[in-house]
């Protein structure tokens, strides 16, 4: 229905404006439909692109050495927080190096604060299998702490662990981050009222205090992960007993010199020197050093611009609720802005 409005112009001359709200609503609807259609088509295009593109196989990229050499040294880099999608990608790189007969040895380059317990062990397991077939040397860079140290142990008891002068390593321990926002919830009138089938189904809810039974359960869980960490180090550092490792496992981070003194690392060496030592160990006069890289998936390419935009979250409780998902981590430092009760 049209709406007539009497409006005076600049010189006081009456002007009649006929508003048509129906046409405005129709225009808004058409614009919304167009935007929705574009988003839907982009999503379908991304899905088809991901299905038809092969991002599962890592590509080789020349790093250094002799480009014409037949023998290869693979440089596998763990320079991320240990979690997916990086876990799957490095495992594929490890498997490719294991199967490639031209790869005679591997330099595992670590610059990571650690990450998830399960992912750290998966990577460790694959490196262990690799080291049973080919020599693996470890090069620690800026930080190789907690899960970063854990995966280094996959190189085996005979593998040298090199650190740079400024490397931080160690931080042996387990943490399950947990927010406790009960006081804040009381102030703003929020309380936990979950529907659950058992007293432990709603465990680690940040909106309620942890019970003694919950703490007992989680203590046992993290102790299992902690004991596994200690055993992995003791098995792969022939100069350290289990009790010596336990004494070092305070959660503290060690400098390069401290790590060498305590038997967690062997000597200071930079990457180019470590590659030379590995080549000498392999008895190779020439070698081609390669990296493994991954092409971006269609979706990643499509979202590369928007991914850099700051996240806008209109739900103030989403992060709190997300924090209630238990995540056992071999991780150095706190990744959270709020104070948390952690193990």
Image (cartoon, helix red, strand yellow):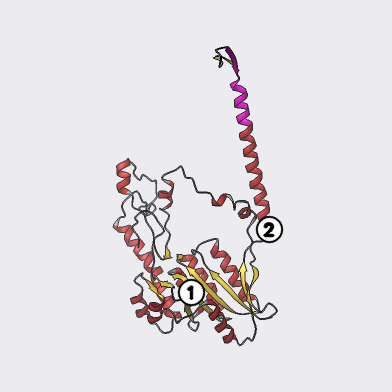
User: Is any part of residue 27 visible from this angle?
Assistant: yes
Q: Are marks 1 and 2 in contact (CB under 8 Å)?
A: no
Image quarter of the C terminus? bottom left
Dividing the picture into quadrants, the one containing residue 223 is: bottom left
Image quarter of the N terminus? top right
Q: Residues within 10 Å of mark 1 (few under 14, many from 20)?
A: many
Residue 238: where, in percent of width, then height? 43, 84
Q: Which region is colored magenta? A: 13-29
Residue 124 vs 208, above or below: the answer is: below
Q: Residue at x 33, y 45 (%)?
A: 185
Residue 224: where, in percent of width, then height? 39, 69
What is the secondary structure assignment of the residue under circle 1? strand
Dividing the picture into quadrants, the one containing residue 325 is: bottom left
Nearest to N terminus: mark 1 or mark 2: 2
Disc ID at residue 68: none
What is the secondary structure assignment of the residue under circle 2? loop
* Magenta region includes residue 27: yes
Between the residue at mark 1 and the residue at mark 2, the CA separation in whole angstroms equals: 34 Å
* Magenta region includes residue 25: yes
Residue 4: where, in percent of width, then height? 58, 14
Residue 305: where, in percent of width, then height? 59, 51
Q: Is residue 196 left or right of residue 88?
A: left
Q: Which residue matches tag 2?
A: 53
Disc ID at residue 140: 1
Residue 301 vs 284, above or below: the answer is: above
Dividing the picture into quadrants, the one containing residue 32 is: top right
Nearer the observer, 282 or 57:
282
User: Is any part of residue 1 visible from this angle?
Assistant: no
């Amino acid at each position: 229905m049209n709406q007539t409005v009497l409006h005076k112009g600049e010189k006081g001359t009456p002007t009649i404006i006929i508003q048509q709200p129906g046409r405005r609503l129709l225009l808004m609807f058409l614009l919304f439909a167009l935007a929705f259609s574009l988003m839907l088509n982009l999503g379908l295009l991304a899905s088809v692109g991901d299905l038809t593109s092969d991002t599962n196989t890592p590509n080789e990229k020349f790093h250094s050495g002799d480009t014409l050499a037949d023998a290869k040294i693979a440089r596998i880099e763990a320079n991320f927080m240990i979690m997916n999608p990086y876990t799957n990608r490095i495992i594929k790189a490890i498997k490719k190096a294991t199967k490639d007969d031209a790869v005679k040895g591997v330099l595992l380059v670590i610059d990571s604060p650690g990450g998830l317990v399960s992912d750290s062990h998966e990577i460790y397991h694959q490196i262990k299998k690799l080291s049973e077939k080919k020599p693996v040397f470890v090069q620690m860079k800026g930080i190789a702490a907690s899960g970063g140290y854990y995966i280094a142990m996959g190189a085996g008891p005979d593998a040298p662990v090199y650190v740079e002068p400024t490397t931080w390593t160690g931080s042996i321990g387990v943490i399950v981050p947990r927010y406790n926002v009960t006081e804040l919830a009381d102030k703003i009138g929020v309380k936990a009222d979950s529907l659950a089938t058992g007293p432990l189904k709603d465990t680690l809810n940040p909106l309620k205090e942890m019970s003694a039974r919950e703490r007992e359960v989680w203590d046992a869980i993290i102790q299992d992960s902690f004991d596994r960490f200690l055993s992995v180090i003791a098995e792969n550092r022939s100069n350290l007993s289990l009790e010596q490792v336990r004494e070092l496992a305070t959660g503290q981070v060690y400098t390069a010199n401290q790590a060498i003194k305590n038997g967690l690392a062997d000597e200071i060496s930079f990457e180019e020197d470590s590659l030379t030592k590995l080549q000498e160990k392999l008895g190779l006069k020439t070698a081609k050093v390669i990296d493994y890289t991954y092409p971006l998936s269609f979706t990643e390419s499509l979202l590369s611009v928007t991914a850099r935009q700051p996240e806008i979250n209109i739900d103030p409780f989403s992060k709190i609720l997300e924090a209630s998902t238990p995540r056992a981590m071999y991780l150095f430092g706190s990744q959270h802005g709020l104070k948390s009760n952690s193990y």
